[in-house]
Image: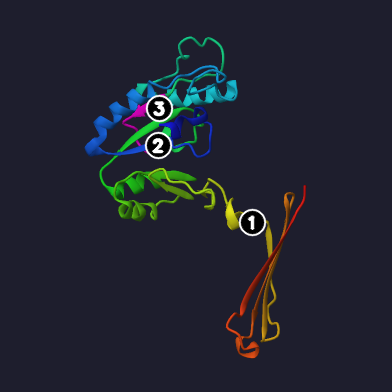
Amino acid sequence: MKACFLNSGQICVSLSRLLVPLSHYREVVEHVRDVAEQFTVGDPSTRVDLGPLASSTQRDRVLSFITCGIDQGARLITGGTEQPPGLAKGYYVRPTVFADVESSMDIAQQEIFGPVLSIIGYSDDDDAVRIANDTSYGLTGCIWSRDLERATRVARRLRMGTVRLNGASDPGAPFGGFKQSGIGREHGHYGLEEFVEWQAIVGSAPATSQLLAAGDSHRGAVDVGARLRDEERDGIGDFFRMTEAANRRP
């Protein structure tokens, strides 16, 4: 629930769809409703769980998605378009949960960027993978399972840049999306490669094939050079060398 409602849903990695096996669907829906109704909304300088949205425009956009979900036949189990109790002013939206959501509905297809959760039932792993991939976006997802091998098998079938198993995280892992969730990666050496320009020298002397790279960014410069040397000529086994120098600018 926190992964959907964090920052009032205004984060790119918000987990706004909850896929639930049909064998446990009813109990999960009831539990999610009870938990969602415990989230408090109000002035973020006080002890609350959710603050306002960024602007009146964003609030109206989120409310329009809630209305659309109702009109398209999803079952509203908590929340809605009414102003939260005691908050006559401000761009607040109540934590909202829909059940019986179809994958084709707008609330399951679009990035709402608000505190709106859609619950979708699935019959088996194949059905879950189909539903999870049935969107134009693919930034991040999460799988919860006692069977890590099964979870890993399913994760490899998902068209998402990051799949977290049982809430795990790694700040050094590459971060980025598939499909309309973007191109390229941040974090670790994968992120540095975004600032590298590779040069291939083709047809050079047989004993020396070179692969050179240089990159520059406003945060600093990184130069990487790699040379494959003739193992037989040099008489050494270590024929690959990479040097890296970093020049940090203030």
Along the viewing direction, whichever of 68 and 214 lies nearer the viewer = 214
Residue linked to disc 1: 192
| Residue visible at 68% across and 76% down in the picture | 210
Give the CA separation, mark 1 to mark 2. 32 Å
Tell me the kind of residue under disc 3.
Gly
Secondary structure under badge 1? helix
Name the front one of labels 2 and 3.
2
Q: Which mark is residue 203?
A: none
Whether residue 102 appears in magenta in the rendering, the answer is yes
Secondary structure under badge 2? strand
Tag 2: Cα neighbours inside 10 Å, few (<14), some, or many (≥20)? many
Per the rendered image, the range of residues in magenta is 96-104
Report x, y in % for residue 123.
25, 43
Report x, y in % for residue 158.
40, 51
Report x, y in % for residue 21.
27, 40
Give the CA separation, mark 3 to mark 1. 41 Å
Residue 148 vertical position relative to residue 31 in the rendered view, above or below? below
Asked whether the residues under the numbered discs 1 and 2 touch, taking CB atoms below 8 Å apart as contact, a structural biologist would say no
Q: Which mark is residue 69?
A: 3
Q: Looking at the rendering, in which quadrant would you find the N terminus?
A: top left
Q: Is residue 226 left or right of residue 141?
A: right
Reading the chain from its start, which is encountered first: label 2 or label 3? 2
Q: Which mark is residue 17?
A: 2
Residue 1 vertical position relative to residue 194 in the rendered view, above or below? above
Tag 1: Cα neighbours inside 10 Å, few (<14), some, or many (≥20)? some
| Residue visible at 51% across and 11% down in the picture | 87
Reading the chain from its start, which is encountered first: label 1 or label 2? 2
